[in-house]
Structures are given as C-alpha cells and as structure tokens.
Amino acid sequence: MPELPDLEVICEFLSPRLVGVNITSVDMRRPLIVRNLLGGELADHLTGRRLASVGRRGKFLLLALEGDMTLVINPMLAGRIRYGEPLAHHRARDALVLGLDNGRELRYHDAADMGKVYLARDPDQVPTFASLGPEATDPALTLDVFCERLRPHRGEIKGILSNQSFVAGIGNAYADEILWSAYLYPFRRRTNLDDEGITRLYEAMRPVLSEAIATLRDRVGENIDIEVRDFLSVHGKAGQPCPRCGSAISEVKRERMATHFCRACQPGLMIDRQR
C-alpha cells in the first residue's frame, strides 16, 4: 500500500516530468476503477489538457490540470503508477493510460482493483478526502496539537495512527515502523498510554517518515511502480531478528492486515486486561 514516503518520492519524480505536458490520448480500460465526477466522457475532459502541478495529500496523489480539474488517485492496497515509454501491450489490470505529448505515457495499474482514480473539480468531492487530518510531516502538527487530536480516540494505538482523519499519510507499514521505533505495543489502547508514551510516539513519527523518504529517494529512481520495503525494520519481517534486540519479529493478522512487531521491545497482551 503506497503511503506518505512512497507518494512523496513519486511526486518528486513526476513533477518535473509532467508539469507543462499535454495529454494527447486517454484510454480508460476499467470504468469500475476510474470515476468521472464531472459527467460526460473522460476523454473529452482530458484530451488536450495541460498538466499544471503534481501534489500529494495524505495517501492521495493529485494531478492538477489547467482548467480547474484534478485527477485524484487513491492507490489503496495495490495501485501503482508507471511513467515511461509506452508499453507494447496492455496488462490485465491496467485501468487508465494517458498518452503524453513528450512521447511518454502515464499508466495506473491495480492488481487488486481496490484503488480509484477520480476526475473532479474539487478534490473534496472524492470520498474521505475532506475528512483528512493534518499531514503527519506538517511542522504545524506540534506535540500539543498531536495530543489534542489524540484525546478523543480510545482504541488501539496502531489503528489510531493509521486513521487518516487523525493524521494523514500513515498506513499499515509505517505504523508498524513508528510503533517499533517508539517501543510501543501496537494493540495497546490509547486510554492506557501515558504522557511519556505519547511523547515517544510523536517523536518517532517524523524521523521514521523522513528517513524512509530519504531512503526511497535513493532507491526508487525511475521505477516508481515498484514498492520498496526491504529496508524497513519490522514490517514484513516476520520471524527475522529484531534489528534492536535480536528477538524474532512477530506477526499478527487481522482480516486483511498484518501487524509486525517485536514482543521483547514492544511488550503487551493481545487482550488488554486494563480495558
């Protein structure tokens, strides 16, 4: 699932390559994935339009077009964006292909068919967009503001950290990384987290995200459709030694989400007896 660090690096790569470029062709291959909130034919809105800016909000990628329109991409679990020379053949799960006047193409592919691409005049029309909290990396998100926003939440701390209305941009993988860095048990309830624990959580959040952005900036290059996660400390590392203490990293699966943590560094009980 692309999260804040992934999308930040994708934005950095795409911005100098897309801004000022015109869309010459539009191939909407999976209407279930591509939602035109303006009505009419998607190609009629996009063909000949110039891309004005590339941005990010939370886990959404924003491609602003001249003429007060925005392509809002929510990759969800498996959405990927490819920029480069046109492919000789379409892939089974390619949802949208934009031909560009620089000879390249921008292609959205989704192996799980869970993500969405919206064309809207106002991104707030896109589901969940208007309810996004402050960016996790926003300097205006001070410790006091973080604590104030945390106070109404009473559930498990990992669920809160990955709740986009609390802070925007953190998903399953980087929630694991932040909690490991903060020595916090992911299933601990917020109501049982003291001030010192909250401060550790806040102070771990930005460094984890900033270091991931720096690593991805070096590693991803032009392959923005490839997810790079092998450098993470615990996420996806079930059974491997914890980089800090050497204990085996644990994995707990709930529905479609896997949580990875170190039981030695992040002790706790699955059933919170203090609840």
Image: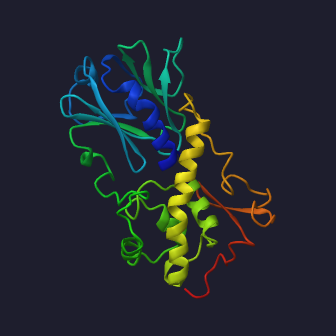
Q: Quadrant of the C terminus?
A: bottom right
Occupied quadrant, residue 17: top left
Occupied quadrant, residue 244: bottom right
Side (left or right) of 76 relative to 221: left
> Where residue 192 sits: x, y (%)?
54, 84
Q: Count up the numbered dots.
A: 0
Q: Which residue in the rendered view is the most extreme toward the left?
A: 67
Side (left or right) of 161 relative to 264: left
- Compare residues 42 and 32 and report the one nearer the observer: 42
> Where residue 230 sits: x, y (%)?
68, 45
Q: What's the image's color scheme?
A: rainbow
> Where residue 207 sits: x, y (%)?
54, 59
User: Residue at 61% across / 73% down in the picture?
Assistant: 184
Please say whether residue 3 is visible from this viewpoint.
no
> Where residue 11 sits: x, y (%)?
43, 37
User: Residue at 46% across / 43% down in the picture?
Assistant: 8
- Compare residues 23 and 39 and report the one nearer the observer: 23
Vertical side of 132 occupied by 61: above or below? above
Vertical side of 89 occupied by 202: above or below? below
Please say whether residue 260 is visible from this viewpoint.
yes
Q: Which residue in the rendered view is the most extreme toward the bottom?
A: 274
Side (left or right) of 148 relative to 220: left
User: Residue at 58% across / 88% down in the picture?
Assistant: 274
User: Residue at 21% across / 38% down in the picture?
Assistant: 121
